[in-house]
Image (cartoon, grey):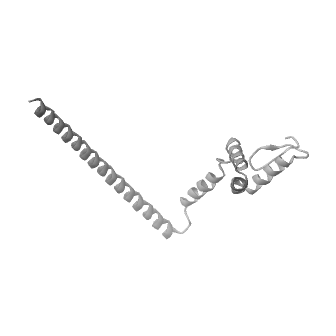
Amino acid sequence: MTPAATDTMERVVPPGPMGWFARAEAWLDDKGKGAWIAVMVLGFVFFWPVGLALLAYMIWSKRMFSKSGRTRTARYGMTAMKPSGNSAFDAYKQETLRRLEEEQHAFESFLERLRAAKDKAEFDQFMDERARKAAEARATED
């Protein structure tokens, strides 16, 4: 590898003196996405074109939609399914998850029946209006 170091976003930082913009960018990267958002909001508060420029830069450089937030959520989701080591708690957790899945299935089937009933009522209303208009049209022709 070259003498250049890599930072947390897997970009290569060139060796040697950096300009003020590169130093500011590296400092904000070290602080995280929250620092970028705070600077952007302050830019909007003090001089809106600066905030707009920072928002555009964050979107263009993919800092706004980076994976940092998703990895924390994914890690949490994986730990929720990991056994705790306590067999009583694990049995309770498994039973609770099974019960919640059954309730979710029952609720989804209820919503499906509700949608079907609503669709049928709307269709019946449409057919009644259509029949009424056809009867009125025949009555006016006579």
Find residue 108 and report its horizontal and vertical position in percent: 36, 53
The residue at the point 59 percent across, 53 percent down is 74
Quarter containing the N terminus: top right
In which quadrant of the rendered view does residue 96 lie?
bottom left
The residue at the point 20 percent across, 37 percent down is 130
Considering depth in this image, is 57 or 115 the residue closer to the camera?
Answer: 57
Left or right of 71? Residue 130 is left
Residue furthest toward the left? 142
Considering depth in this image, is 91 or 80 the residue closer to the camera?
Answer: 80
Find residue 93 and report its horizontal and vertical position in percent: 47, 65
Count of marks placed on residues: 0
Q: Eyeballing the image, is 105 above or below 125?
A: below
Considering depth in this image, is 113 or 5 the residue closer to the camera?
Answer: 113
Left or right of 30? Residue 17 is right
The residue at the point 74 percent across, 47 percent down is 9
Find residue 107 and report its horizontal and vertical position in percent: 35, 56
Quarter containing the C terminus: top left
Considering depth in this image, is 48 or 68 the residue closer to the camera?
Answer: 48
Q: Eyeballing the image, is 120 above or below 85?
A: above
Left or right of 90? Residue 11 is right
The residue at the point 12 percent across, 32 percent down is 140
Residue furthest toward the top? 141
In which quadrant of the rendered view does residue 77 lie?
bottom right
Left or right of 35? Residue 141 is left
